[in-house]
Amino acid sequence: MPGGRTGAEESGHAFAVAALAGCLVGLVGGGFRWCLEHADRLRGSLLDVSTVLGPAAWLLPVLLTAVGATVACWIGLRVPHSAGSGIPHVQTVWRKETEPHVRWLVTAKFTGGLIAIGSGLVLGREGPIVHMGATIGSWAGRWSRVCGEDARLLHAALGGAGLAAAFSAPLGGLVFICEEVTHSVRPRMVLLTLVSTVTAVVCAQAIVGDEPVFGVPPLSAPPLWSLPVFLVFGVTAGVLGAGYGALVVGTFRVCNERLGRVPVLARAAGIGAVVGGLMAFEPLLAGGGDPLSEWLSEGRSITVAGLVVFLAVRFAAGPLSYAAATPGGLFAPLLALGALWGALVHELLSPLLSDGSMGPSVFAVVGMAALFTGVVRAPLTGIVLLVEMTGSATLLIPLMTACFAASLTADRLGSEPVYESLRRRMGERL
């Protein structure tokens, strides 16, 4: 074709764009993670300093989170689609229900997400990074003038690169796009996503390091006789996940419909103040939950009463934080909740578990994947993510067993996958 690219040239061009855009996503995602780590440390230092205030020490965390939620919500209002996780928007773009919005979205998602999560709201980093990745993919496709279908594929593929950068999980990013966003496995989609996830993780690790997200000790594979235990455990995680997904959507609906007369910024400030009060009581009750997930996945013990309190409070605080309409995701709080549930089940079953290969770390890791599956209904993504995040391939069989049971149980309960519910609500407003 005179003056144009041949099929082979067009194909190679798209892969080159995916690789370069993946590098950019990795730098943005790695930078976002680095900033959040330092924001967490700064928040911890402020909480330590607040003790000099005596009985009024609780005022500082309440004010910090309330102001952070308000500012982040204001940013979300100023830039369309920048509030919330962003993953439902990536799905609607893939389904051609809306157009990708590039202008200021990456800046708003980065800044707003950093302020919201850094101030202590119970939100995750992965949603903003996925959304920023997909937006960078759209920008790269447009400016490199790839063909229309490749531009659409790049939007999805770079969203997967965002998830890979968020959790240092290149295969997890690929599986997530196939299982949750496109609901299909296309050879070209797979290859473009692989190229972008690998380059994204390499660049992100140059900033945050190449250690697994959770420092899990070496774990041996549980015995075969324990599989029924993990099957039942998965059922309980499916029930819990169905309830959590319903609470996320229900709290969002209540705040946006029944409390519609309350100004959005005032609602965000009120939610921030509540979460800040929890943080004043116990810092681990707030924030994305990575320190808590790591603590439990390492096998460190918490009393049964402590686990119940953490589980109950964070079960409510996550949906409440999401309803504040700030940039922020659902994954990381879900993982912390799953680790808490796994640790609690282990404590309750410990008198019956004489085998040392079924310690608290095993239940915490399997709980993360199983609860994630019960809420999101993406079992393969949950399994692959946890294997990559912990480096514990020995737990594949328990992970598969529990995730199967969690997904089937949530389906039988009539629970809709949380991102499908949020995407449908977004579609109703478009």
Image (tube, rainbow, N blue to C red):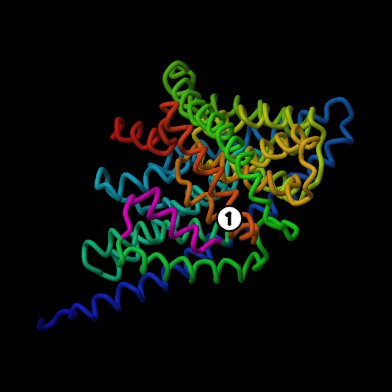
Q: How many marks?
A: 1
The answer to which image quadrant residue 387 occupies is bottom right
Where residue 280 appears, as percent x and y from the top left, is 77, 31
Which residue is at the front of the view, 338 or 204?
338
Where residue 10 appears, as percent x and y from the top left, is 24, 76
Q: Which residue is mark 1?
A: 396
The answer to which image quadrant residue 417 occupies is top left
Residue 40, visible in the rendered structure: no
Q: Look at the numbered disc 1 and give the secondary structure of its residue.
A: helix
Residue 422, visible in the rendered structure: yes
Which residue is at the front of the view, 169 or 120?
169
Q: Is residue 179 magenta?
A: yes
Quadrant of image for the C terminus: top left
Label 1 packing within 10 angstroms: few (<14), some (14-19), many (20+): some
Where residue 147 appears, as percent x and y from the top left, is 21, 67
Q: Residue at x 43, y 60 (%)?
A: 174
Which residue is at the front of the view, 47 or 383?
383
Q: Amino acid at mark 1?
A: Leu
Region rendered in magenta? 169-185
The answer to which image quadrant residue 270 occupies is top right
Quadrant of image for the N terminus: bottom left
Q: Residue at x 42, y 32 (%)?
A: 411
Q: Residue furthest left?
A: 2
| Residue 287 versus residue 207 in the image, above or below | above
Q: In the rendered view, does 244 fall on the left or right side of 216? A: left
Where residue 81 appears, as percent x and y from the top left, is 39, 42
